[in-house]
Amino acid sequence: MAEISGTHDVAVGEKQDQGELLTVPEGWKEPGFSKDDNPHGMLEESSFATLFPKYREQYLRECWPLVKKKLAEFGVRAVLDVIEGSMTVATTRKTWDPFIVIRARDLIKLLARSVPYEQAVRILDDDVFCDIIKIGGMVRNKERFVKRRQRLIGPNGQTLKAVELLTQCYVLVQGNTVAAIGSHKGLRDVRKIVVDTMKNVHPVYNIKAMMIKRELAKDPVLKNESWDRFLPKFQHKQLSKRKQPFKKREKKEYTPFPPPQPDSKVDQELATGEFFMKEKEKKQRKRQQQQVREVEAKKAQQERRNKAFVPPEEPTHKVKTSETGSNSKVDVEALKRKIKKVTKKQSLGQIKNL
């Protein structure tokens, strides 16, 4: 029993140690990769190339000396081919950072997507990353695509500025792409906002939710709890623009059996006994039916005509009965006093006139 309890304590202690290792302390930073970590350099050459549009040629010509100087610090060679319209970065024997060629590739991609050099050069830092979101194929209609892209930018770029402040990322909308530079968490939020905007969800909804999350993160009590009850829940209303029919036909209940076969003309004649009649009798019967239909039609027509001569019903007026009935009692004494008072006033008036 003692051995079992001892092994149980060791297992619990190992689990606690693993839990402590999984938690990253606040303010911790991964140590940087320096030239002393790889003094021998690279043996093989790696290169990446990307094309750039014609309107970026003049700007790239001006800033290319700065790009070459910055990449030379890491031992990376940069080539600008104006004839083919391409930029190439490649490692050399002096390159000591094996990952720097990936960051150099991102640098030339950002420069090709109209990101200014001052912002694009930040990608060479260890704690900065980039994401180029392609939005060209998300909306088929060209006019709708332009409207939603403008909705992402906002009036005078206010919406885009709000996204940058909340995500701590640099965001640039250019053509059919959105370029973002920042941390992993900020890039994830930027991608969500951009994709939702292209799916006809207004960016203000995501901005409002991010502002609430930022305030909740400051509270140490709610930091490790679920925030679903605080976040607003927006329902996506999609109204169909298809014209609805005036009379909708209700669907019948599905049955696996086919409908019953209708009776043929011969079957109907056999049921009524007409099949065994002679031709003369059939014509006589048909004539009688036609005469009955004509009489009914004539009668219905005569009723429609007679409706115009029917006088309308006159409204009955009710005579209002007086509220005071014969049984109502009259105060004789009060009436005498009133008459006496009136006669007295009249006599006084006559005396004054004299």
Image (cartoon, grey):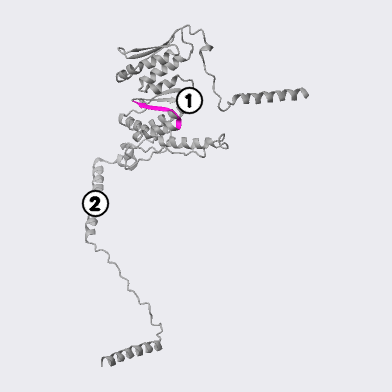
Identity of the residue furthest to the right in this view: 2
Percent position (x, y) of residue 142?
31, 29
Crowding at dot 1, Cα within 10 Å, few <14 / some 14-19 / many 20+, comes out as some
What label sits on residue 297 in the rendered view?
Answer: 2
Percent position (x, y) of residue 218?
53, 36
Instruction: Give the label, 1 or 2, closer to the camera.
Output: 1
Res 234 quadrant in image: top left
Percent position (x, y) of residue 173?
36, 27
Query: Residue 300 magenta-drawn?
Result: no
Name which residue type carries label 2: Ala
Left or right placement of residue 18 versus residue 265 in this view: right
Percent position (x, y) of residue 49?
38, 13
Using the image as rendered, state which of residue 178 and residue 276 is in the foreground: 178
Query: Residue 171 magenta-drawn?
Result: yes
Using the image as rendered, state which of residue 32 and residue 333 is in the foreground: 32
Distance between the Cα atoms at labels 1 and 2?
Answer: 85 Å
Q: Which residue shows up at 46% across the image and 10% down it?
A: 95
- On the image, numbered disc 1 is attached to which residue? 184
* First to last magenta residue range: 166-174
Left or right placement of residue 193 versus residue 284 in this view: right
Q: Quick check: can you spot residue 87? A: yes
Name which residue type carries label 1: His
Q: Which residue shows up at 40% across the image and 27% down it?
A: 171
What label sits on residue 301 in the rendered view?
Answer: none
Res 222 quadrant in image: top right
Earlier in the chain: of badge 1 and badge 2, it is: 1
Left or right placement of residue 149 versus residue 5 in this view: left
Using the image as rendered, state which of residue 209 and residue 326 is in the foreground: 209
Q: Quadrant of the C terminus?
A: bottom left
Using the image as rendered, state which of residue 274 and residue 263 is in the foreground: 263
